[in-house]
C-alpha cells in the first residue's frame, strides 16, 4: 500500500471549495428519479443525463473534486465515443466507483439491513483501478425506530465497512466510508445524535482493528438532524453545532476529510448546514459535500429528458455546485442563492 498516494488523493477530494458529485445511483434508484421527471429509464437516457452533468465544464473544473459512478457509467461512452471517465478527468476531477451491492435485510433483525458486496471485491477493485477509479464508496444504512438500531446491525455494518476500506487501500483506492443514519423517522435530533455517536465509534473501532490507515480515507456521514416526520425541527445553527460536536468527538484528526451525504434534506438546507459548519472554523479535517439528490434534483427537473433543455439542466447543476462550493468555504448566504439564481 502506498499511503502517500492514497493521502494525496483524499486531500484532493476535499480541496478547499470543492466537493463530490454522487452520481452513482443504481439502475433502480435512477429509475425513481427519472419516473419523477417522466423520463424512460434506458441506458441511452442514463448516458445522456450523466454526460450533460460531466460536460458542465466550468462547474466541474471549479467545484467538483470527484464523481462517484455506478458500474455501468464507469464503462460508458459519451455520444461522440469519449469515455465518461475521460470527460471527468479532463475537467481535473477524480473518477470514483460505488462498489457495494446494496443493503439487504439483516436476518433476525426486523427493519434492519446489512450492506452486501464483499465477495470478489479485491478483483473488482483491480478492474475498477484499470478503468480509472481512484476512490470508492460503500454505504451502510442504519435506520432509527422503536428498538432499532441494534448492536447486531451496527457492528455487522461497521465490520463490512472496515473490510471494504482495507481492500480498497490494498488496491490503491481511497475508500469513502459511509455509515448513513437515516432521517426518515419521527425521532428528534437528540436521538440522531446518540445513534450517530454510537455508529461512528463502532466504525472507527472496526477500521482500527482492520488496520485501515485513516490518512487515506474519506468519511461520508449524515448530519445530526431530526427525523423528517419529527414535529420539532431544529435551526441551522443547532444542526451545525451538534454535527461538529459529534464529529470532533468521534473522528480522529488523521482523517483528511469529511464529505456529507444530503440524505433527503432540501437543496437549500443541505447547503445552509454545510456552510454554517464551515463558518464555525478551526476544524481538523476538510468538511465538504458528497451530495446526490441535493446536487441533482434541480438539474433533473430542468432537463426533463429533452435535448433542448441541456443548457438549462447544466445551468441548474452549475448553480447548485457553486452554492455548495461556497458552503464548503463557509461563505454561502441566502443573498448568494438569490443573486446567482
Ligand atoms: P444523497 O446526497 O442523495 O443522500 O446521496 C448521497 C449518497 O451517495 C448516498 O449514498
Image (cartoon, rainbow, N blue to C red):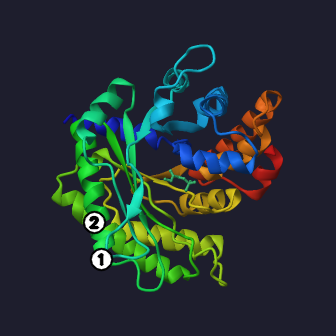
Image location of residue 32, percent across then percent down = 64, 51
Q: Is residue 60 left or right of residue 163?
A: right
Image location of residue 257, percent across then percent down = 41, 50
User: Residue at position x 31%, y 63% from top?
Assistant: 157
Is residue 2 placed above or below 198 in the rendered structure? above
- Whether the residue carrying mark 2 lies under 8 Å from ligand 1 is answered with no
Q: In this orientation, which residue lies closer to the viewer: 64 or 314?
A: 314
- Note whether residue 138 is visible: yes
The quadrant in which residue 78 appears is top right
The N terminus: image quadrant:
top left
Residue at far top of view = 80
Image location of residue 179, percent across then percent down = 40, 61
Question: How far apart in space, not on screen, are marks 2 and 1 (Cα)?
Answer: 8 Å
In primary-sequence order, the first of circles 2 and 1 is 1
Q: Which residue is mark 1?
A: 151
Asked if labels 1 and 2 touch by Cβ distance under 8 angstroms, the answer is no
Is residue 5 placed above or below 17 in the rendered structure? above
User: Residue at position x 61%, y 57% from top?
Assistant: 275
- SS class of the residue under badge 1? helix
User: Residue at position x 44%, y 59% from top?
Assistant: 283
Q: Which residue is mark 2?
A: 156
The quadrant in which residue 299 appears is top right
Q: Is residue 64 left or right of residue 316?
A: left
Q: Is residue 319 left or right of residue 30?
A: right
Amino acid at each position: 500500500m502506498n499511503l502517500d498516494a492514497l493521502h494525496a488523493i483524499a486531500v484532493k477530494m476535499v480541496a478547499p471549495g470543492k466537493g463530490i458529485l454522487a452520481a452513482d445511483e443504481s439502475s433502480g434508484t435512477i429509475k425513481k428519479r427519472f419516473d419523477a421527471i417522466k423520463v424512460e429509464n434506458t441506458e441511452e437516457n442514463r448516458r445522456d443525463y450523466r454526460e450533460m452533468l460531466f460536460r458542465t465544464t466550468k462547474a466541474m473544473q471549479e467545484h467538483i473534486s470527484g464523481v462517484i459512478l455506478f458500474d455501468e457509467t464507469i464503462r460508458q461512452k459519451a455520444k461522440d465515443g469519449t469515455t465518461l471517465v475521460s470527460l471527468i478527468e479532463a475537467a481535473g476531477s477524480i473518477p470514483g466507483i460505488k462498489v457495494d451491492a446494496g443493503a439487504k435485510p439483516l436476518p433476525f433483525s426486523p427493519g434492519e439491513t446489512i450492506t452486501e458486496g464483499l465477495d470478489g471485491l479485491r478483483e473488482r477493485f483491480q478492474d475498477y483501478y484499470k478503468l480509472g477509479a481512484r476512490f470508492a464508496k460503500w454505504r451502510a444504512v442504519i435506520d432509527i425506530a422503536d428498538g432499532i438500531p441494534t448492536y447486531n446491525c451496527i457492528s455487522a455494518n461497521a465490520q463490512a465497512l472496515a473490510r471494504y476500506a482495507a481492500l480498497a487501500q490494498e488496491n490503491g483506492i481511497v475508500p469513502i466510508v459511509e455509515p448513513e443514519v437515516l432521517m426518515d423517522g419521527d425521532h428528534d435530533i437528540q436521538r440522531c445524535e446518540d445513534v450517530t455517536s454510537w455508529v461512528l465509534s463502532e466504525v472507527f473501532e472496526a477500521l482500527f482493528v482492520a488496520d485501515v490507515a485513516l490518512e487515506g480515507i474519506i468519511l461520508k456521514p449524515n448530519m445530526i438532524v431530526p427525523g423528517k416526520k419529527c414535529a420539532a425541527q431544529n435551526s441551522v445553527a443547532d444542526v451545525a453545532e451538534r454535527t461538529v460536536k459529534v464529529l470532533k468527538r468521534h473522528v480522529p484528526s488523521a482523517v483528511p476529510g469529511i464529505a456529507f451525504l444530503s440524505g433527503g434534506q432540501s437543496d437549500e438546507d443541505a447547503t445552509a448546514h454545510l456552510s454554517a459548519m464551515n463558518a464555525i472554523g478551526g476544524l481538523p479535517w476538510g468538511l465538504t459535500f458528497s451530495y446526490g439528490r441535493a446536487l441533482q434534483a434541480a438539474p433533473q427537473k430542468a432537463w426533463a429528458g429533452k435535448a433542448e433543455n441541456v443548457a438549462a439542466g447544466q445551468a441548474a447543476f452549475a448553480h447548485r455546485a457553486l452554492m455548495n462550493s461556497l458552503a464548503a468555504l463557509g461563505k454561502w448566504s441566502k443573498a448568494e442563492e438569490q443573486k446567482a439564481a
